[in-house]
Image (spheres, rainbow, N blue to C red):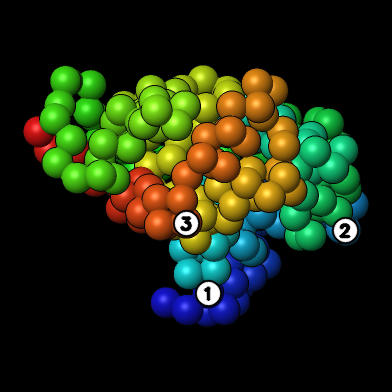
Amino acid sequence: MRPLDRILISSLLLFSLPSAQAAPGQKVFTQGGANPAAMACLGCHGPDGLGMAAAGFPRLAGLPAGYLSKQLRDFRDGTRKNPIMEPLAKALSDAEIAAVTQSLAAMPAPAAPDNRRQQMAGSPVQQLALYGDWSRQIPGCVQCHGPGGGGVGEHFPPLAHQPATYLVAQLNAWRDGSRHNDPNQLMVGVAKAMTDAEVKAIADYFAAGQEVKP
């Protein structure tokens, strides 16, 4: 399905949902905030919150509420740049941010592969995902983002099942300095140490949600 078609379907769903029955967070997700500039999330991120891969809109469903709240606050203060998200985040109240992020965190999402057992990497991209390249100060992605890239707590979001175009865009944002909202500045160094080919390969790998075979 084309991104435009999904946006049109999402818009139809938006106007068909009864506002009186929606919880505060669900109402922000499906209808937007009290400020008209705070548009409904589902228009870009889909009625299931799983994003639109073809358009590069990320999955929000199942991400930790604390992580999502931080990103919205960072869009507000300019620490993280995006021409769509910055005005939207500025239009949301603190209460709306808390409500919608809790609703998003509770939404169903694909499970990340469980790769906790010790494994041998069968390809360069698996090597980078599992073990990194310490000669360039690149830790393995799963060492911070959890088994299978499923995310850890509020500071290391899921990579698994995020659109590859979104992951590439974020890595490039870390590289060029347009994104710098990592409290430890870890991702800046990691992204800058990666080649263009590695950025694309690691994004494709996690977008596919593939389990690394021993």
Residue that sits furthest to the front in the current view:
135
Q: What residue type is labelled 3?
A: Asp
Q: State left or right for residue 65 relative to residue 195.
A: right
Q: Is mark 1 on a helix, strand or loop?
A: helix
Q: How far apart are marks 2 and 1 (CA)?
A: 23 Å
Residue shown at the point (19%, 45%) measured from the top left: 123
Would you name the residue on which mark 3 appears? 196
Q: Which of marks 3 and 1 is in front?
A: 3
Q: Residue 81 at what x, y percent from top left?
A: 77, 49
Mark 1 Cα-neighbour bin, 10 Å: few <14, some 14–19, many ≥20: some
Would you name the residue on which mark 1 appears? 3
Would you name the residue on which mark 2 appears? 36
Residue shown at the point (57%, 42%) measured from the top left: 192
Q: What residue type is labelled 2?
A: Pro
Q: State left or right for residue 7 relative to residue 133.
A: right
Mark 3 Cα-neighbour bin, 10 Å: few <14, some 14–19, many ≥20: few
Residue shown at the point (56%, 47%) measured from the top left: 171
Q: In this view, does 207 lie above or below 23?
A: below
Quadrant of the rendered image containing residue 126: top left
